[in-house]
Image (cartoon, rainbow, N blue to C red):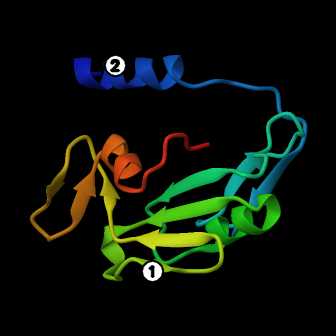
Amino acid sequence: MKDAELEELYYTYVENEDVLCTNRIRLGKPEDGGWDVCDDIEHRPQSPCLVYSFGINRDFSFDDAVSDKYRCEVHSFDPSMGQNDHKHSDRVFFHNLGISDQDFVNSINWTMRTLTSIKKQLHHTKVG
């Protein structure tokens, strides 16, 4: 394994919190597009809540489910869809942006932003 790969693996473990979850549920499609989340009362999002969803690939099923179940405001991001920014539903907003380690427009004309830049652009201070 290369040094950069080891460093990434190390930070993956160090920067994540593990919790004991007794009630895991699937939000969104049962196959690709959905995600398992912990629905234990002490870990579930409490309204008002804000969720960022990156790389949705034309599939809003997870985003819609989070919005419906927890009443969270959800911001969905995917520059590959070729769609303009729009309001998908009452609490789900689409952004024609991708996430990266720097702000730039790539060779296929996708606008990429850091998480810090995205939060600043949307005037968000806390996501979770």
Of residues 24 and 42, the one nearer the viewer is: 42
Quarter of the rendering occupied by the N terminus:
top left
From where the camera sits, is residue 36 visible?
yes
Mark 2 vs mark 1: which is more N-terminal? Answer: 2
Three-letter residue code for mark 1: His
Q: 10 Å neighbourhood of mark 1: few (<14), some, or many (≥20)?
A: few
Q: Is residue 63 above or below residue 82?
A: above
Quarter of the rendering occupied by the C terminus:
top right
| Eye-nearest disc, 2 or 1 | 1
Q: Is residue 4 above or below residue 27?
A: above
Residue at image mark 1: 86
Q: Residue furthest front?
A: 123
Secondary structure under the numbered disc 2 in the rendered image: helix
Residue at image mark 2: 6
Three-letter residue code for mark 2: Leu
Q: Where residue 85 appears, x then y in whole percent?
A: 38, 77
Of residues 113 and 55, the one nearer the viewer is: 113
What residue do we see at 42% from left, 17% from top? 10
Image disc number at residue 48: none
Q: Residue furthest left?
A: 107
Q: Quadrant of residue 57?
A: bottom left
Q: Where residue 42 appears, x then y in whole percent?
A: 86, 33
What residue do we see at 25% from left, 23% from top? 4
Q: 10 Å neighbourhood of mark 2: few (<14), some, or many (≥20)?
A: few
Of residues 125 and 43, the one nearer the viewer is: 125
What residue do we see at 34% from left, 19% from top? 6
Q: Where residue 5 appears, x then y in whole percent?
A: 30, 25
Q: CA distance from mark 2 to mark 1?
A: 39 Å
What residue do we see at 57% from left, 25% from top? 16
Q: Where residue 59 appears, x then y in whole percent?
A: 55, 75
